Image (cartoon, rainbow, N blue to C red):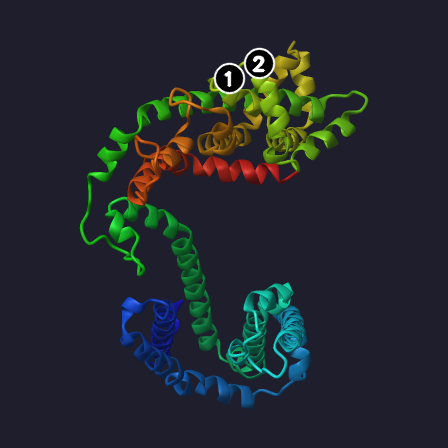
Amino acid sequence: MFAKLNKEKKIGAVSVLVGFAFLLLALLLIPLKTAGSGKYFLLPIAAALILLPIPWLWKDGVRQMKEKPRLESHWRRMRQSGFFDLLTLLFLLALVLGGCWLFGRLSYQAALHRHAPGAATLEEARLLPDFVEYNFKQDLNLIAKSYPSFGWAAVIAAAVVLVCGLYMRFVSPIVQADEHLQIVHKVYRVAAQYAAAILVVIISLFPIYWMLISSFKTSDELMRAVPTLWPDTFIWSNYPNVLNKAPFGRYLVNTLVTTVIMMLGEMTIGVMAAYGFSKGQFKGKNVLFMLVLGALMVPIQVTFVPIYVTISRLNAIDTWAGVVLPNMVSAYFIFMLRQNFMAVDNSYIEAGRIDGLGRFGTIIHVLCPMCKPTLITVSIISFINGWNSYFWPKMVTQSEASRTIAVGVQRLKETYAGQFVSNYNEIMAGAVMAIIPIVFLFLILQKYIMTGMSKAAMK
């Protein structure tokens, strides 16, 4: 696609791409104090690289646009674009944000006048002897407290609408008139997609990178006011210190055993319940399924008191059974498996019954093989949830013999005397060791997760 362009358009396209790369780099470096003043020189360089190639990029398109007769008005042409509807919604959002800014500004000034008559700004109000800033801030509503943010958001949204509208009005006809310029804009579109994907990946992986790199820092370096993106000196002793300070081996065994038991319980009960709700015929099936879905809306923080009382009466506090029993059933997995089982045609089940299969045989030999991706997905999600579970194990475990790894990492903050210390570097090292099995599991089985999710959503 890029090879079809002539030399001038190739140079112009590359110049614009480099200019946008410099612009993005400058915007990313502005919040960083360590980048120095050199980051501000990237802005004029980026503007020059983007604007200078425009004459030789657009000259053929402008000439061809003038030669072709215009069949319809520019307004009608813009209205026919689906992107115009999106800009309209963005413009309405800008109006709403602008209205919030105006309301917040008026509310702010009214509250300031009540607490400091005659003062136009907060700085002037602070000079008054009877002004209490705490009472003033408590009198502000939510919109008044953050009205500058609404204003900036409205300005940004309006600027995007203006730039995109000008592009559709003046640039789009030029692009449509020149086939080579259309190729250049396709290159821009692909480059923008890759840049957006890379930016999302960086944002998503940065917390993991920060955790990993912090596990090799000293405690003093980690607590600096200006954080460093790379350790001054790699401290490899953080990991041995973690293993010596807490029984991580025991935590891993406890977590692995309880997670596997919970996964098997959720899979077994989920498959049987999903079969009943999808292929079974009995009175009240839909009502019972609605109750199951209702359980999705109730967090464990609401129900943990009666669950804790029940586990206590079973004498299962500080045991594997106390950790496992409340997590043997998952309403979410029942829903996923039911949706997948409903997508299986009943003719397969009838064929199995003709061959002599009962209900359990139908589940094992017909439904489960046909829904293998979803079953693998459910088991992976169950394993990850069990491995990362913190709230309930924190409530029900009391000794090192039954604590899971999520609770054990938090215990690293305590010394042998029970005092809390700021050893966040060791906590980061423990967190890295805790997530390694989950990361490897996801990397190996990620294709099954995507396949299972898509199939569960088809019905």
* Nearest to the observer: residue 95 or residue 20: 95
Identity, as a three-letter code, of the amino acid under mark 1: Ala
Farthest residue to the top: give it. 356
* Nearest to the observer: residue 459 or residue 394: 394
Image quadrant occupied by the C terminus: top right
Label 2, residues with CA under 10 Å away: few <14, some 14-19, many ≥20: few
The answer to whether residue 145 is above or below residue 198 is below
* Mark 1, residue position: 321
Contact? badges 2 and 1 (CB < 8 Å): yes
Badge 2 or badge 1: first in the primary sequence: 2
Nearest to viewer (mark 2 / mark 1): 2
Where is residue 380? Give x, y as percent: 48, 31
Farthest residue to the right: give it. 283
Identity, as a three-letter code, of the amino acid under mark 2: Leu
* Mark 2, residue position: 314
Q: In this view, does 209 lie to the left or right of 103?
A: left
Q: Residue at x 70, y 34 (%)?
A: 294
Label 1, residues with CA under 10 Å away: few <14, some 14-19, many ≥20: some
Q: Which residue is drawn at 51% across and 28% down?
A: 395
Q: Which residue is drawn at 27% across and 76% down?
A: 38
The answer to whether residue 399 is above or below residue 201 is above
Q: Is residue 153 visible?
A: yes
The residues bearing labels 2 and 1 have C-alpha atoms spaced at a distance of 10 Å
